[in-house]
Image (tube, grey):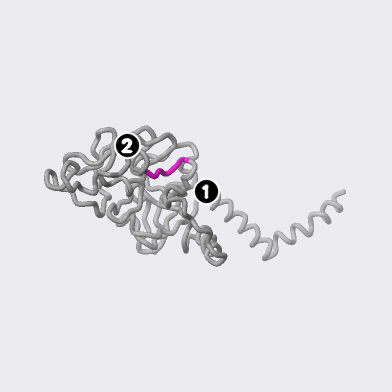
Amino acid sequence: MTQTRQRAHGPLRRFAGSFWGQLLIAFAVFSFVLSFVAKPYWVPSGSMEQTLLPGDRVLVDRLAYRNAEPRDGEVIVFEASHAWDGGARVDPSPLKAAWLWLGQWTGFGPSGDHTLVKRVIATPGQVASCCSADGNVEIDGRALEETYLFNDFPFTPKSLDCTTTPRSERCFGPVTVPKDSYLMLGDNRTNSSDSAVRCRSAEADQASCWRWATRTGVVGRVVAIIWPIDRWRGTPR
């Protein structure tokens, strides 16, 4: 019985100890880590400057929201719904599809057809609006101190604000964030196609102009910049 069992397991053990066996095991472990633990993400645009720069590679913690919800102020990666592009997506060519696949796996290249990185500004049930008398975003009537902002739309009380004509493009809302949804804005507001981009005019239909990140679309929380080397650092705030 023992000799039979050893003969049966011999080829399997030899394969596991071979180059190809080790490569397969490493691939399986790598796949598990990317699918359930952490994955790299390539920052494609300047919408999160100066917190994240175009071309940065960040590490996304996929376990961050396993037993918790995204909180306001956190930087997350999420899969955008068709509402973010009007539903007019085009299937990529085989070459582009392969490039996207490689980017998703390595972080060195595009990370998905419509995977975005933004900052959570308001969570389900909260009321968001802009602006306070000083030009701040307000959540449930409380003005935010957004020290991370890089560039915002012009706002001058009584000269260019939410009551003047023309009014400041900084203004939006008020809007109540729906269930299982999140209001996402970029730190570089003037260069960010975010949740409020279609809602910043007096003529905007506040009932339909909003685009939300959804709970099911959240990939994870950005916990570190891992490339380039001179930008290594922990969780961006």
Instruction: Please report the residue visible at 55 percent of the width from the left and 50 percent of the height from the top.
Output: 35
Q: How many marks?
A: 2
Residue 71 lies within the magenta run: no
**Tag on residue 118?**
none
Is residue 212 covered in magenta?
Answer: yes
The secondary element bearing badge 2 is classed as strand
- Image side of residue 153 versus residue 64, left or right: left
**Residue 16, image x and y in percent?**
70, 59
Question: Of marks 1 and 2, which one's residue comes earlier in the chain?
Answer: 1
Residue 75 appears left or right of 201 = right
10 Å crowding of disc 1: few (<14), some (14-19), many (20+): some
- Across and down, in percent, residue 81 comes to 46, 47
| Location of residue 231 (image quadrant) | bottom left
Determine which residue is flagged by label 2. 175
Position of 94 relative to 4 (above/below) = below
Q: Which mark is residue 37?
A: 1
Tell me residue 163's x, y (percent): 17, 41
Q: Magenta segment, which residues?
A: 210-215
Q: In the rendered view, would you say 25 is above or below 73?
A: below
Who's the residue at 22% across and 42% down the image? Answer: 136
Image location of residue 122, percent across then percent down:
34, 39
